[in-house]
Amino acid sequence: MSDRETEFRSFFDAEFRSLRRIGYLLTSDWTEAEDLAQEAMVRVYRAWARIRERERPAVYARAVLVNRHRSLLRRAKVEAKHAIARQPDTPAVVEGMGEDQIVVWDALAALPRREREALVLRYYEDLPQAEIAKVLGIPVGTVKSLTHRALGRLRAVLGPDVHVPAEDR
């Protein structure tokens, strides 16, 4: 096995599960999440020689996954517009999830796509705002705005008794 393949295999082992979880949080579907993560890894592998040294491959992989998810959402909109029958996705409830977790999950799933992406990357992946901006291809100020609005929506839906993280200002 070449050094390139060994490096990529190590990267794959370290990042695939995280990519799959991000995909799940964005889609509420483990099958779609797996497909998104696999496609992101294929594209990272193709670009490995170019990105392994001068870019952070994990940031590149997350950006590929988020962009592919957006592309799939655009396609779904076009299909719906042209009256192609499609089953609505419902959030999958993971066995063992408590009632509070389900309520939070439903509130997160109801957020607009960009707000949900910003929150998932910030609070689930614990990425700094600058890295989220790179992944989503938007300015840092927009990341701050999206996060602020999303947290406000969650507070409004979940009420004062639920802890919603403080914003990064």
Image (tube, rainbow, N blue to C red):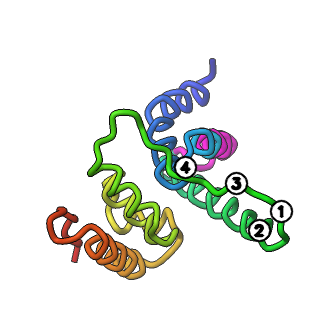
**Dot 1: element:** loop
N-terminal of the two: label 4 or label 2? 4
Q: How far apart are marks 1 and 3 (CA)?
A: 10 Å
Residue ID for mark 2 = 80
User: The disc labelled 1 sits on which kind of residue?
Assistant: Ile
Residue ID for mark 1 = 84
**Would you identify the image quadrant in which residue 159 lies?**
bottom left
Give the foreground label among 4 and 2. Answer: 2
Q: Identify the residue at image location x=33%, y=34%.
A: 96
Residue ID for mark 4 = 61
Give the foreground label among 4 and 1. Answer: 1
Residue ID for mark 3 = 87
Q: How far apart are marks 4 and 1 (CA)?
A: 31 Å
Q: Distance between the residues labelled 3 and 2?
A: 10 Å
Please provide the residue range marked out in magenta. Answer: 37-52
- Which percent across, then down, holds residue 36? 62, 46
